[in-house]
């Protein structure tokens, strides 16, 4: 008789144990960024497993990349796609949830694949965002409360960490009020994710975590945005590379190559359409030529 040596993985238990591990790392982390790093990794893993379980509960084949050949399980991004698909999961994640999941996955990939700088403030803010997402998923889809998974002590410690952040935020908002800064001049800080990044008077600093980043005007729509968010549109132009130098054949009238992401998308589309038109004109011209010389 063949002995089945494989352990049947229980996705729910697995996702919960990653959550416990993540919280454990976070509680002991304090200002140690390396601990926060592992807290985030465990947390995103827990989120991924929770999402896969919802998919599996709809049909066990849905967690496979290829349902005709169920070998590899789907990526987390594909999982979210399938869950959002009205014909499969039909879950309408809010914009906030979608954004939260996307940035958490991006952060996990950065931690595991590339060289980058993680700040404690950023890790902490991301941690609480993903944590509340997991809590929502567990409650909504499995009818499980956070207190069923975590110990009372663990929850209390988390509350303490979050409270200290709240004090910093309320202090910052008081300063904003004292300085008479209007709401529209407060942006979400890319570092600590609280809405306390002041763009007033070129201050360009977060009043909670002191993160600074230059804010620039997009040359095409004149909207303000973080300098890091401006992207180059050079890939949309007719360009050739020769001995390490880029030669632009046609810039389609765009002299300033930096654009905000909305303008970059719009410009890329516009150039694409103009190219298609020019190609059509050319074809018509050759057609006319061949007709004329018949
Ligand atoms: Zn900040
Ligand atoms: Zn723009």
Image (spheres, rainbow, N blue to C red):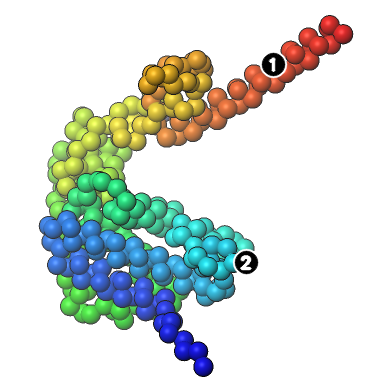
x%, y% of residue 77?
A: 46, 57
Give the total of numbered labels: 2
Q: Residue at x 38, y 31 (%)?
A: 231
Circle on res. 282: 1
Quadrant (top left/top right/bottom left/bottom right) for the C terminus: top right
Q: Closer to the camera: disc 1 or disc 2?
A: 2
Circle on res. 68: 2
Of residues 84 and 136, the one nearer the viewer is: 84
Q: Measure the alpha-carbon separation of dots 1 and 2.
A: 46 Å
Is disc 1 placed on a helix, strand or loop? helix
Q: Residue at x 34, y 36 (%)?
A: 229
x%, y% of residue 246?
A: 41, 19
x%, y% of residue 17?
A: 31, 76
Q: Residue extending furthest right?
A: 294
Can see residue 143?
A: no
145 up-or-down from 264: above or below: below
2 up-or-down from 198: above or below: below
x%, y% of residue 254?
A: 46, 18
Decide: few, some or many residues near mark 2? Use Cα within 10 Å; few <14, some 14-19, many ≥20: few
Q: Residue at x 55, y 24 (%)?
A: 271
């Amino acid at each position: 008789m063949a002995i089945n040596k494989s352990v049947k993985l229980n996705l729910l238990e697995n996702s919960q144990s990653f959550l416990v591990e993540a919280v454990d790392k976070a509680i002991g982390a304090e200002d140690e960024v390396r601990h926060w790093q592992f807290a985030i990794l465990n947390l995103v893993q827990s989120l991924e497993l929770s999402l896969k379980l919802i998919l599996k509960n709809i049909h066990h084949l849905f967690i496979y990349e290829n349902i005709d050949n169920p070998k590899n399980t789907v990526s987390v991004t594909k999982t979210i796609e399938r869950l959002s698909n009205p014909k499969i999961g039909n879950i309408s994640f809010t914009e906030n949830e979608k954004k939260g999941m996307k940035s958490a996955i991006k952060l996990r990939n950065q931690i595991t694949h590339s060289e980058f700088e993680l700040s404690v403030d950023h890790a902490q803010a991301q941690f609480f965002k993903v944590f509340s997402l997991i809590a929502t998923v567990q409650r909504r889809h499995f009818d499980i409360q956070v207190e069923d998974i975590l110990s009372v002590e663990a929850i209390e410690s988390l509350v303490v960490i979050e409270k200290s952040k709240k004090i910093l935020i309320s202090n910052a908002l008081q300063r904003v009020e004292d300085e008479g800064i209007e709401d529209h001049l407060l942006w979400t800080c890319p570092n600590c994710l609280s809405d306390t990044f002041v763009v007033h008077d070129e201050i360009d600093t977060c009043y909670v975590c002191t993160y600074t980043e230059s804010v620039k005007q997009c040359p095409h729509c004149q909207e303000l945005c973080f300098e890091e968010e401006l992207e180059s549109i050079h890939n949309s132009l007719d360009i050739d590379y020769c001995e390490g130098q880029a030669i632009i054949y046609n810039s389609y009238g765009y002299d300033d190559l930096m654009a905000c992401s909305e303008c970059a998308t719009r410009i890329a589309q516009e150039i694409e359409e103009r190219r298609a038109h020019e190609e059509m004109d050319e074809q018509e011209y050759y057609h006319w030529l061949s007709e004329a010389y018949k």
